[in-house]
């Protein structure tokens, strides 16, 4: 009997979580793919509606030797957060007062961890990312503010936080909108000279931080490069090109000198 040729799409499907080579059963999808889609959709919905366990995150960061402070946006409740993105960009008055009580001399960088649209991503990946970033911060001699853990956070909430804490730059670690192939993707948004009213064109973004995407250690190295460049040049966003990959490749290809 003639051997049935192997479907070339199967080898490609093994290389990506994207939904390719799904097959068919008559005019419909196979049952396994229908169930897989339903599971991915449920995981995405759960990630959007899940709450962030801030005390547990604070304990993880305390184990790294970091002080933390909890704040809230004006979006009081998850339904309100999803319906009113503008409220997630502004600090609630009690939280502003809490940060003002901590404000002191200017610092180089504030790390803000916000739940965003996937608290799952924040809980699972932000401690590893911050832990990997700390040696870079020490190498650069950065003066860090207390890590801000924010509930009901949009990216622009970091602008309000940075201005209140008198930070030269802010790096917002936030859960990205879940997709059907990843519900645990963490994003990092770096802004120099942050203040309310800034646009995304004034930020640098590192996205898809997760074990099956950009590894936390690699994301930390990229963030360190961007922070160093931002503080030395006084810019972020479209004016600051991420050249960390080029430098890494150059270092890897450099000849080793004899001792």
Image (cartoon, grey):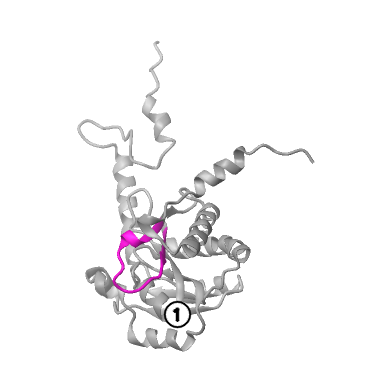
Was residue 101 drawn as part of the magenta stretch in this picture? no
**185 and 229: which is toward the camera:** 229
Task: Choose top left, top right, bottom left or bottom right for residue 8.
Answer: top left
Q: Secondary structure at mark 1?
A: helix
Q: Position of residue 44 (x, y in %)?
A: 33, 57
Residue at image coords 20%, 32%: 27
Q: Is residue 185 visible?
A: no
* Residue 130 versus residue 178 in the image, above or below: below
**214 and 38: which is toward the camera:** 214
* Residue 133 versus residue 63 in the image, above or below: above
Q: Is residue 56 left or right of residue 72?
A: right
Q: Which residue is mark 1?
A: 165
Residue at image coords 47%, 65%: 123
Q: Position of residue 187 (x, y in %)?
A: 41, 59
Q: Is residue 120 left or right of residue 20?
A: right
User: Which quadrant would the C terminus be assigned to in this image?
Assistant: top right
User: Which quadrant would the N terminus be assigned to in this image?
Assistant: top left
Dot 1: few (<14), some (14–19), or many (≥20) neighbours within 10 Å? many
In the picture as drawn, the residue positioned furthest to the front comes out as 233
**125 and 187: which is toward the camera:** 187
Count all numbered tags in the image, as a single digit: 1
Residue at image coords 37%, 61%: 203
* Residue 63 versus residue 118 in the image, above or below: below
Was residue 191 drawn as part of the magenta stretch in this picture? yes
* Residue 227 versus residue 51 in the image, above or below: above
In the picture as drawn, the residue positioned furthest to the top comes out as 1
In the picture as drawn, the residue positioned furthest to the right comes out as 259
Residue at image coords 50%, 63%: 232
- What is the magenta range? 187-205
């Amino acid at each position: 009997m003639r051997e049935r040729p192997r479907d070339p799409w199967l080898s490609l499907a093994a290389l990506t979580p994207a939904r390719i080579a799904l097959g068919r059963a008559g005019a419909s999808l196979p049952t396994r793919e229908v169930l897989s889609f339903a599971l991915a959709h449920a995981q995405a919905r759960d990630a959007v509606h899940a709450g962030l366990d801030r005390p547990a995150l604070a304990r993880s960061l305390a184990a790294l030797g970091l002080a933390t402070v909890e704040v809230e946006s004006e979006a009081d409740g998850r339904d309100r957060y999803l319906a009113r993105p503008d409220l997630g960009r502004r600090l609630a008055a009690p939280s502003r007062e809490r940060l003002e009580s901590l404000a002191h001399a200017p610092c180089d960088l504030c790390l803000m961890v916000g739940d965003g649209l996937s608290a799952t991503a924040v809980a699972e990946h932000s401690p590893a990312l911050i832990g990997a970033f700390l040696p870079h911060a020490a190498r650069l001699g950065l003066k860090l503010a207390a890590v801000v853990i924010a509930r009901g956070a949009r990216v622009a909430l970091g602008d309000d936080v940075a201005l209140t804490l008198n930070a030269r730059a802010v790096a917002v670690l936030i859960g990205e909108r879940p997709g059907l192939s990843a519900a645990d993707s963490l994003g990092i948004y770096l802004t120099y000279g942050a203040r309310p009213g800034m646009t995304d064109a004034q930020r640098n973004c590192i996205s898809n931080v997760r074990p099956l995407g950009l590894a936390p250690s690699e994301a930390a190295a990229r963030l360190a490069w961007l922070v160093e460049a931002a503080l030395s040049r006084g810019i972020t966003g479209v004016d600051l090109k991420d050249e960390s990959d080029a430098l890494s490749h150059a270092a890897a290809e450099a000849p080793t000198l004899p001792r």
